[in-house]
Image (cartoon, rainbow, N blue to C red):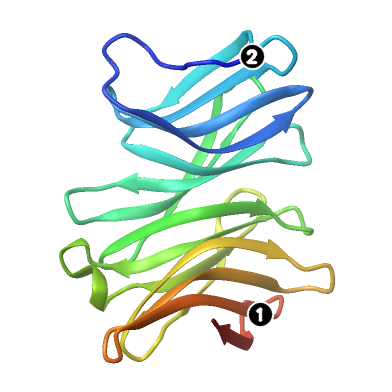
Amino acid sequence: FELTFGNPGTQYERFNSGTYFSGDLVGAGYATSPSGAYIVRVNSSTGQYVWQTRLGDATEANSIQNTSDGNMILGGTKLNGSNSSKMALTKINGNGGWLWTKTFSSPLQSQAEKAIQTADGGYAIFGIRDWDLMNQFASGKLYLVKTNSNGDSLWAKNYAVPAGWQRGHDMIELSGGGYALAGESYNSISGVGGSIIIRTNASGDTLWTRTV
């Protein structure tokens, strides 16, 4: 089957991530009118709607993952003005009901691309901080935040290049402890950009960095 999602009057919608939840498909992303995270659950066999929900407050969902307690965790961005945003970690239940949202900010833009549940029952959220929309090629650091099971920050680490910017896209927790972070990097002096992988310990401290 093929499905098209949307409501009359909606100007723009997109899905950024999806998960397989209790036999159904759940897509998460962003919609306007009103603006906010847009989550849809459909039957994986028939494509029939189970539910759809919008989390307003100008929040965008960039990732979604099942949690061990039968709920789902979203990683995304909460807009806070024309050149200001915060990383947003949101938990919803299996019916699309909002449970809580926690935000993590920096002086300029902060955006989350991925959130995961960690082995200790808490969460980790990864993306970019200190990104200036007015000067995109001169700012931005990889940003990793570790939280407890309630989404409260335990520690935060940023990873920067001397000149230029980095942007985080994906992450995993490693079985031996620590994280593997993947993103992109650009050196504003040499004009050279590429991919970056960072291996950290369980406290988020860098063990090694590779660029390609």
Give the number of the disc on residue 1.
2
Q: Which residue is mark 1?
A: 200
User: Amino acid type of disc 1?
Assistant: Thr
Quadrant of the image occupied by residue 99: top right
- The residue shown at (34%, 72%) is 140
Residue 107 in the image: x percent, y percent? 26, 68
- The residue shown at (54%, 65%) is 145
User: Amino acid type of disc 2?
Assistant: Phe
Mark 2: few, some, or many residues within 10 Å (few <14, many ≥20)?
Answer: few
Give the tally of numbered discs.
2
Q: Earlier in the sequence, mark 1 or mark 2?
A: 2
Residue 59 in the image: x percent, y percent? 37, 39
Residue 105 in the image: x percent, y percent? 36, 61
The image shows residue 199, relative to residue 10, as above or below, that is below
The quadrant the N terminus occupies is top right
- The residue shown at (75%, 53%) is 121
The secondary element bearing badge 2 is classed as: loop
Q: Nearer the viewer, residue 22 or 202?
A: 22
The image shows residue 16, relative to residue 136, as above or below, that is above
